[in-house]
Image (cartoon, helix red, strand yellow):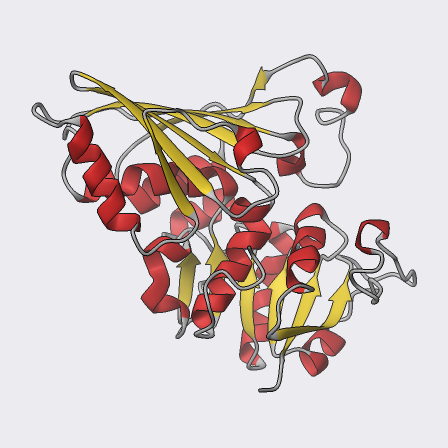
Amino acid sequence: MAKIQLGIAGASGYGGQELLRLAVRHDDVEIAVAMSSAANNEVQELPALKNLWHGQIEPFSVEKLIAESEVVFLGLPDGISAELAPQLVENGRKVFDLSGAFRLRDEELRKQWYPKSPSLPTTTTYGLPEWNRTRLASANLVACAGCYPTAAILALKPLISSGLLADNADIYIDAKSGISGAGKKPSERTHFSEVHGSIAAYGIFSHRHAAEIEQELARPVTFVPHLVPLDRGILETIYTRVEPGTTDNTIRETLEDVYQESPFVRLTGNTPPEIKHVVHTNFCDIGWILEGTRLVLVVCIDNLVKGAAGQALQSFNIAHDLEESKGLL
């Protein structure tokens, strides 16, 4: 069987490099072209991929991306993806977009948080594989889920869908992420001297991932992200309440039933997971503690893998009827 020709735009960024690292181990794909996020005359090499991948990061060219790729992964800033993705779809390419440009289905919300994003192309699908498997094959544009939303949705959606969460229960999501979640472009906020030895809350009531979480859960949430001095990884502690009579076994059975066919969701029960257990993997670890009607969920993922590149490749595998874990284990 001929290998599927992949194009990666934004391959020099953190998410793009992670995608390259995963894709070179995938038996059914060939990296046809890997490009930077902006047009320039420089060809880049990635020392971290030496002897793993023998290609180079080329200057960005949409014409070459279309000409040489069957499937395109976009690891680009939101505004660039918003402009480029529809053009690629119109030229018959299947697109997996790691940006947030097309995640929000409500047009007004999308304009608020992603003002450069156009109307959604037809057959756009939200790329959270565990919940949208059947839609991935027919989608021309897969808007891969954000890193913070991935952890929150995987933990909470089964409980909401099964009616275990109390109707009037508040949901508080205390989320902590490593620095790579801010992207590769340096800033004062992500400078080593600013981050080292500190933890900082940010984006309170003003982080666009809250809208994404609320969209998928159909429930309001209070979402507070924090920047922690780690290079990668996300840990979310989620506080809420369940219906009276809900037991630990009920929660366990509900999560096990939903995720029994999901190879990348691991349930840790009453032992809260840790970031070091998931870094450099595509796993999402979910633990919980129930006391009366009070429920605390603890969720961990690697923001660059399950929160970005790995999730995109997982969606690609499902969309092309390949083994879900290809290139990811």
The reply, left or right, for residue 110 in relation to residue 90 is left
User: Which of the image's four quarters has the C terminus?
Assistant: bottom right
Q: Is residue 6 visible?
A: yes
Residue at (59%, 17%) from the top-left corner?
200
The reply, left or right, for residue 225 in relation to residue 251 is right
Q: Residue 247: give x, y in percent of width and height.
A: 14, 27
Q: Is residue 116 visible?
A: no
Q: How many marks?
A: 0
Q: Nearer the viewer, residue 277 or 67?
A: 277
The reply, left or right, for residue 252 in relation to residue 149 is left
Q: Residue 130: give x, y in percent of width and height.
A: 36, 54
- Residue placed farthest to the left in the image? 245
Residue at (61%, 59%) from the top-left corner?
81
- Residue placed farthest to the bottom in the image? 1
Q: Residue 115: give x, y in percent of width and height.
A: 53, 49
The reply, left or right, for residue 212 in relation to residue 248 is right
Q: Residue 69: give x, y in percent of width and height.
A: 66, 77
Q: Nearer the viewer, residue 93 or 84?
A: 93
User: Which of the image's four quarters has the N terminus?
Assistant: bottom right
Q: Nearer the viewer, residue 245 or 240?
A: 245
> Residue 182 lies in what quarter of the image?
top right
Residue at (29%, 32%) from the top-left corner?
220
